[in-house]
Image: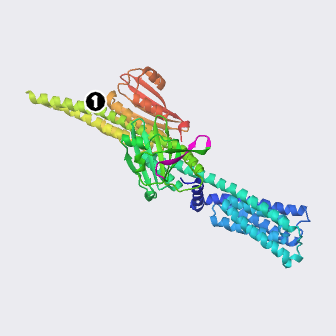
Amino acid sequence: MSATGGSAARKVNFLRQHPGQGHAAARLERVLAIGRAFLTVWGLVAVYVDPTEPSGLAELSYALLVGYALYSVIVLVFVERTTRLAPRDGEFLHGIDILWTAALTFVSNGVSSPFFLFFTFVVLAAAFRWGFRATMLTAAVVLGLVAVQTVILAAGPWGALVSLSGDDINRTIMRVAYLLLSAFMVGYLGEQEKLLRAETTTLAAAGRQPRVDLGLGGSVTAVARELLQTFEASAVDFVIQDFETRRTMLWRVDRSDSGTSRRALHLKLEPSQQNAWLFDDPGSTWSAKKMPEGSGYSVRITERGAWPLTRATITLPREIVEARPFTTVAASNLGLAEEWHGRVYLFDAAAGDNLERSLHFLEQLTEHITPALTNVFLLRRLRSRAGAVERARVARELHDGAIQSLFGMQMKIEALRRRTVTPEETDEELREVQELLQREVLALRELMQALRPIELETSDQLPDVLASLVERFRRDTSVSARFVWTGGPISLPSATALELARIVQEALVNVRKHSRARNVLVRLTNTDETCTLIIEDDGQGFDFEGRLSARELEKRRIGPAIIKERARIAGAQLSVDSAPGVGARLELTFSNGVHA
Protein backbone atom coordinates (compact mmCIF):
# COMPACT_ATOMS: atom_id res chain seq x y z
CA MET A 1 0.00 0.00 0.00
CA SER A 2 1.36 3.40 -0.88
CA ALA A 3 2.29 5.82 1.83
CA THR A 4 0.20 8.89 1.69
CA GLY A 5 3.28 10.99 2.34
CA GLY A 6 4.73 10.01 -1.03
CA SER A 7 1.39 10.38 -2.77
CA ALA A 8 0.82 13.76 -1.20
CA ALA A 9 4.30 14.90 -2.18
CA ARG A 10 3.62 13.88 -5.76
CA LYS A 11 0.33 15.71 -5.61
CA VAL A 12 2.09 18.84 -4.29
CA ASN A 13 4.62 18.67 -7.11
CA PHE A 14 1.83 18.32 -9.62
CA LEU A 15 0.04 21.33 -8.18
CA ARG A 16 3.21 23.40 -8.39
CA GLN A 17 3.71 22.51 -12.04
CA HIS A 18 0.07 22.85 -13.05
CA PRO A 19 -0.65 26.16 -14.83
CA GLY A 20 -3.81 26.72 -12.84
CA GLN A 21 -1.81 26.94 -9.60
CA GLY A 22 -0.12 30.25 -10.49
CA HIS A 23 -2.66 32.06 -8.35
CA ALA A 24 -1.75 29.90 -5.33
CA ALA A 25 1.97 30.65 -5.83
CA ALA A 26 1.20 34.38 -6.00
CA ARG A 27 -0.84 34.16 -2.78
CA LEU A 28 2.01 32.32 -1.02
CA GLU A 29 4.61 34.88 -2.13
CA ARG A 30 2.29 37.68 -1.01
CA VAL A 31 2.27 36.26 2.52
CA LEU A 32 6.06 35.97 2.56
CA ALA A 33 6.45 39.48 1.11
CA ILE A 34 4.41 40.91 3.97
CA GLY A 35 6.55 39.03 6.51
CA ARG A 36 9.77 40.15 4.81
CA ALA A 37 8.72 43.80 4.77
CA PHE A 38 7.59 43.64 8.40
CA LEU A 39 10.92 42.09 9.48
CA THR A 40 13.17 44.55 7.66
CA VAL A 41 11.22 47.69 8.55
CA TRP A 42 11.09 46.77 12.22
CA GLY A 43 14.79 45.91 12.00
CA LEU A 44 15.42 49.50 11.00
CA VAL A 45 13.33 50.69 13.93
CA ALA A 46 15.26 48.42 16.32
CA VAL A 47 18.73 49.66 15.30
CA TYR A 48 17.44 53.24 15.48
CA VAL A 49 16.23 52.71 19.05
CA ASP A 50 19.51 50.97 20.03
CA PRO A 51 22.32 52.89 18.23
CA THR A 52 25.00 50.65 19.80
CA GLU A 53 23.98 47.87 17.39
CA PRO A 54 25.43 46.85 15.04
CA SER A 55 28.85 47.20 16.64
CA GLY A 56 30.94 46.62 13.50
CA LEU A 57 30.87 48.55 10.22
CA ALA A 58 27.74 50.37 11.40
CA GLU A 59 27.41 52.71 8.39
CA LEU A 60 27.67 49.85 5.89
CA SER A 61 25.24 47.75 7.95
CA TYR A 62 22.73 50.64 8.01
CA ALA A 63 23.06 51.05 4.27
CA LEU A 64 22.53 47.34 3.59
CA LEU A 65 19.55 47.21 5.96
CA VAL A 66 17.93 50.22 4.28
CA GLY A 67 18.55 48.57 0.92
CA TYR A 68 17.01 45.29 2.10
CA ALA A 69 13.97 47.17 3.47
CA LEU A 70 13.48 49.01 0.17
CA TYR A 71 13.85 45.71 -1.70
CA SER A 72 11.24 44.13 0.58
CA VAL A 73 8.75 46.95 -0.07
CA ILE A 74 9.33 46.73 -3.83
CA VAL A 75 8.76 42.96 -3.80
CA LEU A 76 5.59 43.45 -1.73
CA VAL A 77 4.21 45.99 -4.20
CA PHE A 78 5.11 43.70 -7.12
CA VAL A 79 3.42 40.58 -5.75
CA GLU A 80 0.35 42.57 -4.67
CA ARG A 81 -0.15 43.59 -8.31
CA THR A 82 0.68 40.19 -9.78
CA THR A 83 -1.96 37.47 -10.06
CA ARG A 84 0.29 34.65 -11.27
CA LEU A 85 3.83 33.59 -10.36
CA ALA A 86 5.93 30.66 -11.54
CA PRO A 87 7.68 28.28 -9.09
CA ARG A 88 11.04 29.65 -10.32
CA ASP A 89 10.09 33.08 -9.02
CA GLY A 90 9.93 31.74 -5.46
CA GLU A 91 13.34 30.07 -5.84
CA PHE A 92 14.83 33.34 -7.13
CA LEU A 93 13.39 35.36 -4.22
CA HIS A 94 14.62 32.74 -1.76
CA GLY A 95 18.17 33.00 -3.09
CA ILE A 96 18.10 36.80 -2.89
CA ASP A 97 16.95 36.62 0.76
CA ILE A 98 19.91 34.36 1.61
CA LEU A 99 22.35 36.77 -0.06
CA TRP A 100 20.90 39.83 1.68
CA THR A 101 21.03 38.13 5.10
CA ALA A 102 24.55 36.79 4.53
CA ALA A 103 25.79 40.29 3.59
CA LEU A 104 24.13 41.90 6.60
CA THR A 105 25.52 39.40 9.11
CA PHE A 106 28.99 39.50 7.51
CA VAL A 107 29.43 43.26 7.90
CA SER A 108 27.86 43.35 11.38
CA ASN A 109 30.04 40.95 13.41
CA GLY A 110 28.99 37.51 12.02
CA VAL A 111 27.04 35.26 14.38
CA SER A 112 27.02 38.04 16.95
CA SER A 113 25.10 40.23 14.51
CA PRO A 114 21.62 41.36 15.56
CA PHE A 115 20.55 40.45 12.01
CA PHE A 116 21.30 36.75 12.50
CA LEU A 117 17.57 36.46 13.20
CA PHE A 118 16.97 37.09 9.51
CA PHE A 119 18.29 33.57 8.80
CA THR A 120 15.31 32.27 10.77
CA PHE A 121 13.01 34.02 8.30
CA VAL A 122 14.87 32.34 5.43
CA VAL A 123 14.38 28.93 7.05
CA LEU A 124 10.69 29.60 7.73
CA ALA A 125 10.19 30.72 4.12
CA ALA A 126 11.73 27.45 2.86
CA ALA A 127 9.37 25.44 5.09
CA PHE A 128 6.38 27.49 3.97
CA ARG A 129 7.25 27.16 0.28
CA TRP A 130 8.49 23.60 -0.07
CA GLY A 131 8.64 21.51 3.12
CA PHE A 132 11.18 19.52 5.07
CA ARG A 133 13.79 18.68 2.44
CA ALA A 134 14.13 22.23 1.14
CA THR A 135 14.26 23.56 4.71
CA MET A 136 17.17 21.31 5.66
CA LEU A 137 18.96 22.19 2.41
CA THR A 138 18.52 25.87 3.23
CA ALA A 139 19.85 25.25 6.74
CA ALA A 140 22.91 23.51 5.25
CA VAL A 141 23.57 26.50 2.97
CA VAL A 142 23.21 28.88 5.93
CA LEU A 143 25.63 26.78 8.00
CA GLY A 144 28.13 26.89 5.15
CA LEU A 145 27.85 30.67 4.97
CA VAL A 146 28.21 30.98 8.75
CA ALA A 147 31.35 28.83 8.65
CA VAL A 148 32.86 30.91 5.85
CA GLN A 149 32.01 34.13 7.69
CA THR A 150 33.58 32.86 10.91
CA VAL A 151 36.82 31.89 9.18
CA ILE A 152 37.07 35.19 7.29
CA LEU A 153 36.29 37.28 10.35
CA ALA A 154 38.82 35.39 12.46
CA ALA A 155 41.73 35.26 10.05
CA GLY A 156 41.11 37.66 7.18
CA PRO A 157 41.67 41.39 6.76
CA TRP A 158 38.18 42.03 8.17
CA GLY A 159 39.50 41.07 11.59
CA ALA A 160 40.95 44.55 12.07
CA LEU A 161 37.60 46.16 11.44
CA VAL A 162 35.30 43.68 13.13
CA SER A 163 36.03 42.50 16.62
CA LEU A 164 35.91 38.75 17.19
CA SER A 165 36.43 37.61 20.79
CA GLY A 166 37.38 34.16 22.00
CA ASP A 167 33.79 33.51 23.17
CA ASP A 168 32.47 33.87 19.62
CA ILE A 169 33.18 30.22 18.87
CA ASN A 170 30.83 29.11 21.67
CA ARG A 171 28.23 31.66 20.59
CA THR A 172 28.53 30.40 17.03
CA ILE A 173 28.02 26.79 18.11
CA MET A 174 24.94 27.67 20.15
CA ARG A 175 23.37 29.84 17.47
CA VAL A 176 24.05 27.21 14.81
CA ALA A 177 22.54 24.55 17.07
CA TYR A 178 19.43 26.66 17.64
CA LEU A 179 19.18 27.34 13.93
CA LEU A 180 19.47 23.64 13.10
CA LEU A 181 16.85 22.77 15.72
CA SER A 182 14.50 25.47 14.39
CA ALA A 183 15.05 24.31 10.81
CA PHE A 184 14.26 20.71 11.70
CA MET A 185 11.14 21.68 13.64
CA VAL A 186 9.65 24.14 11.16
CA GLY A 187 10.67 21.90 8.25
CA TYR A 188 8.81 18.98 9.77
CA LEU A 189 5.75 21.11 10.52
CA GLY A 190 5.88 22.58 7.03
CA GLU A 191 6.06 19.11 5.49
CA GLN A 192 3.06 17.93 7.50
CA GLU A 193 1.13 21.02 6.46
CA LYS A 194 1.97 20.27 2.82
CA LEU A 195 0.76 16.69 3.26
CA LEU A 196 -2.49 17.83 4.83
CA ARG A 197 -2.99 20.35 2.06
CA ALA A 198 -2.28 17.69 -0.57
CA GLU A 199 -4.72 15.29 1.08
CA THR A 200 -7.38 17.99 1.14
CA THR A 201 -6.75 18.70 -2.53
CA THR A 202 -7.00 14.99 -3.35
CA LEU A 203 -10.25 14.69 -1.38
CA ALA A 204 -11.71 17.64 -3.26
CA ALA A 205 -10.58 16.23 -6.62
CA ALA A 206 -12.01 12.79 -5.84
CA GLY A 207 -15.29 14.31 -4.62
CA ARG A 208 -15.70 16.08 -7.97
CA GLN A 209 -15.36 12.88 -10.02
CA PRO A 210 -18.88 11.45 -9.52
CA ARG A 211 -21.14 13.52 -11.76
CA VAL A 212 -24.74 13.08 -12.83
CA ASP A 213 -23.91 13.63 -16.51
CA LEU A 214 -21.38 10.76 -16.43
CA GLY A 215 -23.85 8.27 -15.01
CA LEU A 216 -22.91 5.52 -12.57
CA GLY A 217 -20.43 3.77 -14.85
CA GLY A 218 -18.65 6.98 -15.83
CA SER A 219 -18.53 8.21 -12.23
CA VAL A 220 -17.09 4.94 -10.95
CA THR A 221 -14.50 4.97 -13.74
CA ALA A 222 -13.47 8.55 -12.89
CA VAL A 223 -13.14 7.72 -9.18
CA ALA A 224 -11.14 4.57 -9.94
CA ARG A 225 -8.70 6.53 -12.12
CA GLU A 226 -8.28 9.14 -9.40
CA LEU A 227 -7.45 6.41 -6.87
CA LEU A 228 -5.11 4.75 -9.36
CA GLN A 229 -3.07 7.93 -9.77
CA THR A 230 -3.17 8.97 -6.12
CA PHE A 231 -1.90 5.66 -4.75
CA GLU A 232 0.11 4.64 -7.84
CA ALA A 233 -1.57 1.24 -7.95
CA SER A 234 -1.18 -1.16 -10.84
CA ALA A 235 -4.95 -1.68 -11.06
CA VAL A 236 -8.21 -0.74 -9.35
CA ASP A 237 -11.33 -2.91 -9.18
CA PHE A 238 -14.60 -1.28 -8.10
CA VAL A 239 -17.52 -3.51 -7.05
CA ILE A 240 -21.06 -2.20 -6.47
CA GLN A 241 -24.11 -4.22 -5.42
CA ASP A 242 -27.65 -2.89 -5.79
CA PHE A 243 -29.75 -4.21 -2.92
CA GLU A 244 -33.01 -3.58 -4.80
CA THR A 245 -32.17 -5.52 -7.97
CA ARG A 246 -29.60 -7.83 -6.30
CA ARG A 247 -27.27 -7.12 -9.22
CA THR A 248 -23.54 -6.73 -8.66
CA MET A 249 -21.29 -4.96 -11.17
CA LEU A 250 -17.48 -4.88 -11.39
CA TRP A 251 -15.49 -2.08 -13.03
CA ARG A 252 -11.78 -2.57 -13.76
CA VAL A 253 -9.17 0.11 -14.47
CA ASP A 254 -5.54 -0.79 -15.20
CA ARG A 255 -2.57 1.56 -15.36
CA SER A 256 -2.30 0.97 -19.11
CA ASP A 257 -5.62 2.75 -19.74
CA SER A 258 -5.56 5.24 -16.84
CA GLY A 259 -4.91 8.16 -19.18
CA THR A 260 -7.61 7.32 -21.72
CA SER A 261 -11.11 8.72 -21.77
CA ARG A 262 -12.87 5.40 -22.35
CA ARG A 263 -14.84 3.76 -19.60
CA ALA A 264 -13.50 0.96 -17.45
CA LEU A 265 -14.09 -2.70 -18.24
CA HIS A 266 -17.60 -3.44 -17.02
CA LEU A 267 -18.64 -6.93 -15.85
CA LYS A 268 -21.82 -8.34 -14.36
CA LEU A 269 -21.00 -10.78 -11.56
CA GLU A 270 -22.76 -14.07 -11.01
CA PRO A 271 -24.03 -14.90 -7.49
CA SER A 272 -20.94 -16.98 -6.67
CA GLN A 273 -18.68 -14.16 -7.86
CA GLN A 274 -20.68 -11.64 -5.82
CA ASN A 275 -19.98 -13.60 -2.64
CA ALA A 276 -16.27 -13.73 -3.51
CA TRP A 277 -15.73 -10.04 -4.29
CA LEU A 278 -17.94 -8.91 -1.39
CA PHE A 279 -16.80 -11.49 1.14
CA ASP A 280 -16.95 -10.76 4.86
CA ASP A 281 -13.73 -8.81 5.15
CA PRO A 282 -11.98 -8.09 8.47
CA GLY A 283 -12.72 -4.34 8.55
CA SER A 284 -13.92 -1.27 6.70
CA THR A 285 -10.43 -0.54 5.30
CA TRP A 286 -7.53 -2.99 5.22
CA SER A 287 -4.34 -3.92 3.42
CA ALA A 288 -3.20 -7.49 2.73
CA LYS A 289 0.31 -8.64 1.84
CA LYS A 290 1.17 -12.10 0.64
CA MET A 291 3.16 -14.02 3.25
CA PRO A 292 6.51 -15.47 2.14
CA GLU A 293 5.51 -19.06 2.81
CA GLY A 294 2.44 -18.55 0.62
CA SER A 295 -0.03 -19.89 3.20
CA GLY A 296 -2.14 -16.73 3.34
CA TYR A 297 -2.10 -12.96 3.59
CA SER A 298 -0.96 -10.77 6.46
CA VAL A 299 -3.57 -8.06 7.00
CA ARG A 300 -3.40 -4.63 8.62
CA ILE A 301 -6.82 -3.20 9.52
CA THR A 302 -8.02 0.28 10.47
CA GLU A 303 -10.23 0.67 13.51
CA ARG A 304 -12.65 3.53 14.03
CA GLY A 305 -11.20 6.13 16.39
CA ALA A 306 -7.79 4.41 16.67
CA TRP A 307 -4.63 5.30 14.76
CA PRO A 308 -2.56 2.07 15.16
CA LEU A 309 -3.50 -0.71 12.78
CA THR A 310 -4.51 -4.14 14.03
CA ARG A 311 -3.01 -7.31 12.59
CA ALA A 312 -4.72 -10.44 11.30
CA THR A 313 -4.31 -13.27 8.82
CA ILE A 314 -6.90 -14.11 6.16
CA THR A 315 -7.30 -16.25 3.08
CA LEU A 316 -8.54 -14.24 0.11
CA PRO A 317 -11.23 -15.78 -2.15
CA ARG A 318 -9.92 -17.60 -5.19
CA GLU A 319 -11.68 -15.21 -7.61
CA ILE A 320 -9.70 -12.25 -6.25
CA VAL A 321 -6.39 -14.10 -6.16
CA GLU A 322 -6.80 -15.32 -9.75
CA ALA A 323 -8.10 -12.01 -11.10
CA ARG A 324 -4.51 -10.78 -11.69
CA PRO A 325 -1.02 -11.34 -10.27
CA PHE A 326 -0.32 -9.11 -7.26
CA THR A 327 1.73 -8.94 -4.08
CA THR A 328 -0.35 -6.50 -2.03
CA VAL A 329 -3.97 -5.45 -2.15
CA ALA A 330 -5.82 -2.77 -0.19
CA ALA A 331 -9.58 -2.48 0.07
CA SER A 332 -12.11 -0.06 1.47
CA ASN A 333 -15.88 -0.39 1.83
CA LEU A 334 -18.46 2.24 0.99
CA GLY A 335 -22.19 2.48 0.37
CA LEU A 336 -25.55 3.35 1.92
CA ALA A 337 -27.34 0.97 4.25
CA GLU A 338 -30.24 -0.88 2.64
CA GLU A 339 -29.54 0.77 -0.72
CA TRP A 340 -26.14 -0.27 -2.08
CA HIS A 341 -22.81 -1.66 -1.02
CA GLY A 342 -19.47 -1.13 -2.72
CA ARG A 343 -15.84 -2.10 -2.27
CA VAL A 344 -12.78 -0.73 -4.00
CA TYR A 345 -9.63 -2.86 -4.41
CA LEU A 346 -6.19 -1.30 -5.04
CA PHE A 347 -3.62 -3.79 -6.33
CA ASP A 348 0.13 -3.36 -5.82
CA ALA A 349 -0.01 0.25 -4.72
CA ALA A 350 3.43 1.87 -4.40
CA ALA A 351 5.22 0.72 -1.25
CA GLY A 352 5.78 3.25 1.52
CA ASP A 353 6.86 3.44 5.13
CA ASN A 354 3.73 5.09 6.54
CA LEU A 355 1.10 2.42 6.02
CA GLU A 356 -1.07 3.72 8.87
CA ARG A 357 -1.43 7.15 7.33
CA SER A 358 -2.06 5.67 3.89
CA LEU A 359 -4.84 3.35 5.04
CA HIS A 360 -6.51 6.04 7.13
CA PHE A 361 -6.36 8.38 4.14
CA LEU A 362 -7.93 5.73 1.88
CA GLU A 363 -10.70 5.31 4.45
CA GLN A 364 -11.24 9.07 4.58
CA LEU A 365 -11.22 9.25 0.79
CA THR A 366 -13.90 6.58 0.35
CA GLU A 367 -16.05 8.21 3.04
CA HIS A 368 -15.72 11.50 1.15
CA ILE A 369 -16.82 10.12 -2.23
CA THR A 370 -19.61 7.93 -0.84
CA PRO A 371 -22.28 10.71 -0.69
CA ALA A 372 -21.51 11.85 -4.25
CA LEU A 373 -21.64 8.29 -5.59
CA THR A 374 -24.85 7.69 -3.63
CA ASN A 375 -26.48 10.67 -5.34
CA VAL A 376 -25.49 9.32 -8.76
CA PHE A 377 -26.63 5.83 -7.82
CA LEU A 378 -30.03 6.94 -6.50
CA LEU A 379 -30.57 9.26 -9.47
CA ARG A 380 -29.86 6.32 -11.77
CA ARG A 381 -32.47 4.30 -9.90
CA LEU A 382 -35.00 7.16 -10.05
CA ARG A 383 -34.44 7.55 -13.76
CA SER A 384 -34.95 3.84 -14.23
CA ARG A 385 -38.19 3.99 -12.28
CA ALA A 386 -39.32 7.09 -14.14
CA GLY A 387 -38.59 5.34 -17.43
CA ALA A 388 -40.61 2.33 -16.31
CA VAL A 389 -43.51 4.57 -15.26
CA GLU A 390 -43.38 6.42 -18.56
CA ARG A 391 -43.32 3.17 -20.53
CA ALA A 392 -46.30 1.94 -18.54
CA ARG A 393 -48.15 5.19 -19.26
CA VAL A 394 -47.42 4.91 -22.99
CA ALA A 395 -48.57 1.28 -22.96
CA ARG A 396 -51.76 2.30 -21.15
CA GLU A 397 -52.39 5.15 -23.60
CA LEU A 398 -51.90 2.83 -26.56
CA HIS A 399 -54.07 0.11 -25.03
CA ASP A 400 -56.91 2.40 -24.01
CA GLY A 401 -56.71 4.56 -27.10
CA ALA A 402 -55.18 3.38 -30.35
CA ILE A 403 -55.56 -0.36 -29.83
CA GLN A 404 -59.19 -0.10 -28.72
CA SER A 405 -59.99 2.19 -31.63
CA LEU A 406 -58.25 -0.07 -34.14
CA PHE A 407 -60.17 -3.02 -32.71
CA GLY A 408 -63.42 -1.07 -33.10
CA MET A 409 -62.57 -0.16 -36.69
CA GLN A 410 -61.77 -3.79 -37.41
CA MET A 411 -65.20 -4.86 -36.14
CA LYS A 412 -66.95 -2.16 -38.19
CA ILE A 413 -65.17 -3.16 -41.37
CA GLU A 414 -65.84 -6.85 -40.70
CA ALA A 415 -69.54 -6.14 -40.13
CA LEU A 416 -69.62 -4.02 -43.27
CA ARG A 417 -68.04 -6.84 -45.26
CA ARG A 418 -70.41 -9.52 -43.96
CA ARG A 419 -73.71 -7.78 -44.55
CA THR A 420 -75.42 -6.28 -47.56
CA VAL A 421 -75.78 -2.52 -47.24
CA THR A 422 -76.75 0.32 -49.52
CA PRO A 423 -74.12 2.74 -50.85
CA GLU A 424 -75.42 5.43 -48.51
CA GLU A 425 -74.95 3.16 -45.48
CA THR A 426 -71.49 2.23 -46.71
CA ASP A 427 -70.53 5.92 -46.97
CA GLU A 428 -71.84 6.57 -43.45
CA GLU A 429 -69.89 3.64 -41.99
CA LEU A 430 -66.70 4.67 -43.80
CA ARG A 431 -67.11 8.26 -42.61
CA GLU A 432 -67.30 7.07 -39.00
CA VAL A 433 -64.20 4.93 -39.50
CA GLN A 434 -62.41 7.90 -41.05
CA GLU A 435 -63.31 10.19 -38.12
CA LEU A 436 -62.15 7.55 -35.68
CA LEU A 437 -58.87 7.22 -37.54
CA GLN A 438 -58.42 10.98 -37.53
CA ARG A 439 -58.95 11.18 -33.75
CA GLU A 440 -56.45 8.40 -33.11
CA VAL A 441 -53.89 9.99 -35.42
CA LEU A 442 -54.19 13.18 -33.34
CA ALA A 443 -53.94 11.19 -30.11
CA LEU A 444 -50.83 9.37 -31.30
CA ARG A 445 -49.28 12.63 -32.45
CA GLU A 446 -49.96 14.20 -29.04
CA LEU A 447 -48.42 11.18 -27.36
CA MET A 448 -45.31 11.51 -29.51
CA GLN A 449 -45.10 15.22 -28.71
CA ALA A 450 -45.38 14.48 -25.00
CA LEU A 451 -42.54 11.95 -25.23
CA ARG A 452 -40.33 14.23 -27.29
CA PRO A 453 -38.09 16.53 -25.19
CA ILE A 454 -38.93 20.23 -25.40
CA GLU A 455 -35.97 22.27 -26.62
CA LEU A 456 -35.90 24.95 -23.94
CA GLU A 457 -32.42 25.93 -22.74
CA THR A 458 -33.24 29.33 -21.19
CA SER A 459 -36.46 30.91 -19.96
CA ASP A 460 -36.36 33.70 -22.55
CA GLN A 461 -37.20 31.01 -25.15
CA LEU A 462 -40.48 30.21 -23.34
CA PRO A 463 -42.77 32.54 -25.35
CA ASP A 464 -41.55 31.09 -28.66
CA VAL A 465 -42.00 27.53 -27.38
CA LEU A 466 -45.55 28.21 -26.16
CA ALA A 467 -46.42 29.96 -29.42
CA SER A 468 -45.28 26.93 -31.42
CA LEU A 469 -47.28 24.55 -29.19
CA VAL A 470 -50.45 26.60 -29.62
CA GLU A 471 -49.96 26.94 -33.37
CA ARG A 472 -49.41 23.20 -33.79
CA PHE A 473 -52.57 22.54 -31.76
CA ARG A 474 -54.59 24.95 -33.95
CA ARG A 475 -53.27 23.36 -37.12
CA ASP A 476 -53.91 19.76 -36.02
CA THR A 477 -57.36 20.20 -34.44
CA SER A 478 -58.90 23.14 -36.34
CA VAL A 479 -59.76 24.68 -32.95
CA SER A 480 -59.30 28.46 -32.94
CA ALA A 481 -56.30 28.83 -30.61
CA ARG A 482 -54.29 31.99 -29.83
CA PHE A 483 -51.22 32.79 -27.79
CA VAL A 484 -50.71 36.23 -26.24
CA TRP A 485 -47.57 37.39 -24.43
CA THR A 486 -47.37 40.67 -22.55
CA GLY A 487 -44.77 42.14 -20.25
CA GLY A 488 -40.99 42.11 -20.11
CA PRO A 489 -38.45 39.34 -20.69
CA ILE A 490 -39.06 36.06 -18.88
CA SER A 491 -36.51 35.33 -16.15
CA LEU A 492 -37.70 32.06 -14.62
CA PRO A 493 -35.41 29.12 -13.81
CA SER A 494 -35.06 26.76 -16.78
CA ALA A 495 -36.70 23.87 -14.91
CA THR A 496 -39.73 26.05 -14.05
CA ALA A 497 -40.03 27.27 -17.64
CA LEU A 498 -39.98 23.66 -18.86
CA GLU A 499 -42.78 22.74 -16.44
CA LEU A 500 -44.84 25.66 -17.79
CA ALA A 501 -44.43 24.35 -21.33
CA ARG A 502 -45.49 20.87 -20.23
CA ILE A 503 -48.54 22.33 -18.44
CA VAL A 504 -49.64 24.12 -21.63
CA GLN A 505 -49.08 20.91 -23.60
CA GLU A 506 -51.19 18.87 -21.17
CA ALA A 507 -53.94 21.52 -21.04
CA LEU A 508 -54.28 21.55 -24.83
CA VAL A 509 -54.54 17.75 -24.88
CA ASN A 510 -57.36 17.97 -22.30
CA VAL A 511 -59.13 20.62 -24.39
CA ARG A 512 -59.14 18.34 -27.43
CA LYS A 513 -60.17 15.22 -25.56
CA HIS A 514 -62.78 16.50 -23.13
CA SER A 515 -63.90 20.10 -23.53
CA ARG A 516 -65.33 20.25 -27.08
CA ALA A 517 -64.20 23.86 -27.13
CA ARG A 518 -64.21 26.02 -30.26
CA ASN A 519 -61.81 28.67 -28.96
CA VAL A 520 -58.73 28.52 -26.73
CA LEU A 521 -56.64 31.41 -25.41
CA VAL A 522 -53.18 30.96 -23.82
CA ARG A 523 -51.92 34.16 -22.18
CA LEU A 524 -48.49 34.67 -20.57
CA THR A 525 -47.96 37.87 -18.57
CA ASN A 526 -44.70 38.87 -16.88
CA THR A 527 -44.12 41.79 -14.49
CA ASP A 528 -41.48 42.64 -11.93
CA GLU A 529 -43.57 40.99 -9.20
CA THR A 530 -45.23 37.99 -10.86
CA CYS A 531 -45.35 35.77 -13.91
CA THR A 532 -48.85 34.52 -14.78
CA LEU A 533 -50.01 31.83 -17.20
CA ILE A 534 -53.72 31.69 -18.13
CA ILE A 535 -55.38 29.00 -20.27
CA GLU A 536 -59.10 29.46 -21.00
CA ASP A 537 -61.59 27.86 -23.38
CA ASP A 538 -65.31 27.97 -24.19
CA GLY A 539 -65.95 24.26 -23.79
CA GLN A 540 -67.93 22.16 -21.36
CA GLY A 541 -65.89 23.12 -18.29
CA PHE A 542 -65.28 20.91 -15.26
CA ASP A 543 -67.92 19.19 -13.13
CA PHE A 544 -68.02 22.04 -10.61
CA GLU A 545 -68.91 25.71 -10.73
CA GLY A 546 -66.90 28.62 -9.37
CA ARG A 547 -63.24 29.26 -8.57
CA LEU A 548 -61.17 26.74 -6.58
CA SER A 549 -57.57 26.86 -5.44
CA ALA A 550 -55.14 23.95 -5.75
CA ARG A 551 -55.69 23.01 -2.10
CA GLU A 552 -59.48 22.97 -2.56
CA LEU A 553 -59.15 20.93 -5.73
CA GLU A 554 -56.95 18.41 -3.93
CA LYS A 555 -59.30 18.24 -0.96
CA ARG A 556 -62.30 17.51 -3.20
CA ARG A 557 -60.21 15.24 -5.48
CA ILE A 558 -61.29 17.00 -8.65
CA GLY A 559 -59.54 18.92 -11.41
CA PRO A 560 -56.74 18.04 -13.85
CA ALA A 561 -54.44 15.70 -11.91
CA ILE A 562 -51.32 16.00 -14.10
CA ILE A 563 -51.52 19.81 -14.23
CA LYS A 564 -51.96 19.97 -10.44
CA GLU A 565 -48.84 17.86 -9.94
CA ARG A 566 -46.76 19.87 -12.42
CA ALA A 567 -47.89 23.13 -10.82
CA ARG A 568 -46.81 21.82 -7.42
CA ILE A 569 -43.38 20.85 -8.79
CA ALA A 570 -42.98 24.24 -10.45
CA GLY A 571 -43.95 26.09 -7.27
CA ALA A 572 -46.94 27.84 -8.87
CA GLN A 573 -50.19 28.99 -7.27
CA LEU A 574 -52.92 27.22 -9.25
CA SER A 575 -56.57 28.21 -9.44
CA VAL A 576 -59.31 26.85 -11.71
CA ASP A 577 -62.51 28.64 -12.77
CA SER A 578 -65.27 26.47 -14.19
CA ALA A 579 -68.74 27.10 -15.57
CA PRO A 580 -70.29 23.84 -16.84
CA GLY A 581 -71.41 24.25 -20.44
CA VAL A 582 -69.69 27.66 -20.72
CA GLY A 583 -65.96 27.00 -20.33
CA ALA A 584 -62.99 26.76 -17.98
CA ARG A 585 -60.03 28.93 -16.99
CA LEU A 586 -56.70 27.79 -15.49
CA GLU A 587 -54.44 30.36 -13.86
CA LEU A 588 -50.91 29.74 -12.60
CA THR A 589 -49.03 32.50 -10.78
CA PHE A 590 -45.34 32.65 -9.82
CA SER A 591 -44.13 35.20 -7.32
CA ASN A 592 -40.86 37.03 -7.91
CA GLY A 593 -39.21 34.61 -5.44
CA VAL A 594 -39.24 32.02 -8.20
CA HIS A 595 -37.38 34.24 -10.59
CA ALA A 596 -33.77 33.48 -11.33
Magenta segment boundaries in residue numbering:
293-306
* Quadrant containing the C terminus in the rendered view: top right
Q: Nearer the viewer, residue 336 or 496?
A: 336
**In this view, 58 is above or below 572:** below
For disc 1, the marked residue is: 400
Left or right relative to 378: residue 303: right
Q: Nearer the viewer, residue 388 or 456?
A: 388
User: Residue 57: x percent and y percent?
Assistant: 87, 72
For the question of whether residue 489 can be seen, the reply is no
**In this view, 593 is above or below 210:** above
User: Residue 558: x percent and y percent?
Assistant: 41, 23
The kind of residue tagged 1 is: Asp
Q: Residue at x 33, y 33 (%)?
A: 392
**In this view, 246 is above or below 190:** above
Q: Residue at x 81, y 69 (%)?
A: 104
User: Residue 164: x percent and y percent?
Assistant: 88, 71
